[in-house]
C-alpha cells in the first residue's frame, strides 16, 4: 500500500497491485474534520506534491507544500511554505513518517503561518526513536495513520494517534484477485 516509490513493483517476479490509502483518507477527512471544506492539504516536502494535489482536487480545496532548504544532506536549514493556510485547517499528508522531525517542524510552520488547526495523515506510521515524544509535544490535533503497521502500543503512549483500518481494502483486493476481478476499483473507492 502506497509504495514509497512505484519502481519497487519491478523487484517482484509476480504481479503486484500497489493499493492506495487515498480513498480511506478522503473518507476519514469528510467524517472527522467538520470544517474540511475550509482546509488546505499540505505536503511536508516536494516529493508528495502529486499525492496532495490528488486529495485536494477530490475534496475541491486548496493545496500547499513545504520546501525544505538544506545546508547539507539530512540537515534542514529552513522550511518555506508555498501556499496559503491562514485561517484554515491544515492537513499534512505523507506516505510515511519515521522519527517525525519533518512533520513536527512542518506543523509549527503551518501554525505560525496562521493555520487554525493542524492534522497529519500518514499511510505508514513507523514512529521510531523520538517520534512519540515529538508528536506529544507538537501542535497536532491528531496524527492519523493506517494500520499497515500495528499502532496499539504507540497509541498507549500518545493520545494524538488515531488509526484508519485498511483491512477491508486488503481483504477486497485478495477477493478480487482470487475471483479474477479488477482491483482498480479500489484505487478510488472504499469497499463497504
Image (cartoon, helix red, strand yellow):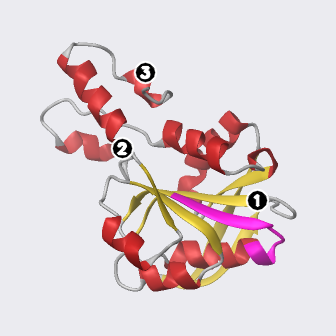
Q: Which residue in the protein does label 2 denote?
A: 6
- Residue positioned 21% across, 13% down in the render: 179
Mark identifier at residue 152: none
User: Callout 2: few (<14), some (14-19), or many (20+) C-alpha neighbours within 10 Å?
Assistant: few
N-term-proximal mark, 2 vs 3: 2
- Quadrant location of the C terminus in the rendered image: top left
Secondary structure under tag 3 reads helix
- Find out whether the residues at labels 1 and 2 contact each other: C-beta distance under 8 Å: no
Magenta part of the chain: 111-121
Where is residue 124 drawn, in percent x and y?
Answer: 39, 58
- Looking at the figure, which quarter contains the N terminus? top left
Q: Is 139 displayed left or right of 116 in the figure? A: left
In the displayed structure image, the side of residue 37 where residue 95 appears, left or right: left
Residue denoted by label 3: 185
Rendered position, 126 above or below 180 = below
Residue in front for this viewpoint, 34 or 47: 34
Q: Is residue 98 one of those drawn in magenta?
A: no
Going from N to C along the chain, the mark reached first, 1 or 2, is 2
Q: How many marks?
A: 3
Q: Secondary structure at mark 2?
A: helix
Residue that badge 1 annotates: 89
- What is the CA distance from the residue labelled 1 to the residue labelled 3? 30 Å
Say which element carries label 1: strand
Residue 31 rendering spot, x and y as whole percentages:
63, 43
**Disc number lying in front (1 or 3):** 1
Amino acid at each position: 500500500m502506497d509504495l514509497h516509490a512505484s519502481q519497487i513493483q519491478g523487484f517482484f517476479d509476480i504481479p503486484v497491485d500497489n493499493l492506495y490509502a487515498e480513498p480511506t483518507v478522503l473518507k476519514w477527512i469528510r467524517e472527522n474534520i467538520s470544517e474540511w471544506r475550509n482546509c488546505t492539504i499540505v505536503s511536508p516536502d516536494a516529493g508528495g506534491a502529486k499525492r496532495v494535489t490528488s486529495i485536494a482536487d477530490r475534496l475541491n480545496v486548496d493545496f500547499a507544500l513545504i520546501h525544505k532548504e538544506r545546508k547539507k544532506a539530512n540537515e534542514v536549514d529552513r522550511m518555506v511554505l508555498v501556499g496559503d493556510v491562514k485561517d484554515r485547517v491544515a492537513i499534512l499528508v505523507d506516505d510515511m513518517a519515521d522519527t517525525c522531525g519533518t512533520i513536527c517542524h512542518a506543523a509549527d510552520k503551518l501554525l505560525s503561518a496562521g493555520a487554525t488547526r493542524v492534522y497529519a495523515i500518514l499511510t505508514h506510521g513507523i514512529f521510531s526513536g523520538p517520534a512519540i515524544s515529538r508528536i506529544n509535544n507538537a501542535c497536532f490535533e491528531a496524527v492519523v495513520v493506517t494500520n499497515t503497521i500495528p499502532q496499539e502500543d504507540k497509541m498507549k503512549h500518545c493520545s494524538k494517534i488515531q488509526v484508519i483500518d485498511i483491512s477491508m481494502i486488503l481483504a477486497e483486493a485478495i477477493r478480487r484477485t482470487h475471483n479474477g476481478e479488477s482491483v482498480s476499483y479500489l484505487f478510488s473507492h472504499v469497499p463497504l
